[in-house]
Image: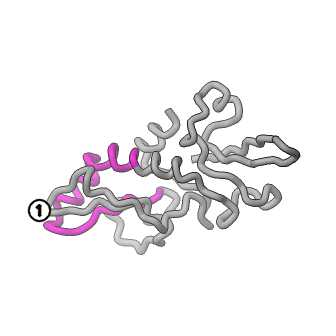
Amino acid sequence: MQLHVSVLEGNGSEIHLLSPFSAVELRARSTSPHVFAGSLLSAELGIIPGNIAYNKEFLVHLHSLVRDLMHDDAQVTTRAAEQENGFVFIIDRRSPAAEINSEENVDKEDIIGVFLCNNFKTDASKYRPNPDYLLVSSKGVGIFPEKVETALLR
């Protein structure tokens, strides 16, 4: 995903908002709070880890899309069917271990969330967001599963 910076001016100060939508795209959309990923703490530092105040409404929207779109994804259901009780991790595609069945170690900041598995299956109610997930990490801006990213940009 790409993040764009939009500058809002008012009362002699500027707020630098981050959104997956450009300024032109934002004008054509509603200004729902969930279209803004957050804001820059310091405009001079740019989009880097630790310089973003995340928008909770954006993160809630993101996780609801992951929950609703990924619980019946073929890779998720296949991985769930392999374990009586366990977990299926949804990993940010910027991570080298982005494949759902990957055996590589994954940094906790790259785990978007997890589906709990019971009796070889999972469902949307068993999704848990990862509180340690970082939308912007040292590896860059998050890259979500394709169907989540497509829905987010709709």
* Residue 112 sits above or below residue 3 on the image: below
What span is in magenta? 64-92
Position of residue 97 in the picture relative to residue 141 (left or right): left
User: Looking at the image, which residue is at 43% across and 44% down?
Assistant: 148
Mark 1 surroundings: few (<14), some (14-19) or many (≥20) residues within 10 A? few
Q: Position of residue 151 (x, y in %)?
A: 45, 37
Q: Is residue 45 left or right of residue 104?
A: right
Residue at the farthest front position: 11
Residue 75, x across and y down, in percent: 28, 52
- Residue 37 position (above or below residue 21): below
Residue 15 % position (x, y): 76, 48
The type of residue carrying mark 1 is: Asn
The outermost residue toward the bottom is: 105
In the rendered image, residue 38 lying in the magenta stretch gets the answer no
Residue identified by numbered label 1:
119
45 lies above or below 25: below
Q: Position of residue 43 (x, y in %)?
A: 79, 55
- Classify 29 as above or below 13: above
Q: Is residue 72 magenta?
A: yes
> Could you tell me which secondary element the residue under label 1 belongs to?
loop
The part of the image, by quadrant, that contains residue 44 is bottom right
Q: Is residue 23 left or right of residue 151?
A: right
Q: Determine the residue positioned at 31% across, 56% down.
A: 127
Residue at image location 42% in from the left, 51% down from the top: 63
Q: Return the residue nearer the eye: 1 or 18.
A: 18
Going by the picture, which residue comes out furthest to the left? 119
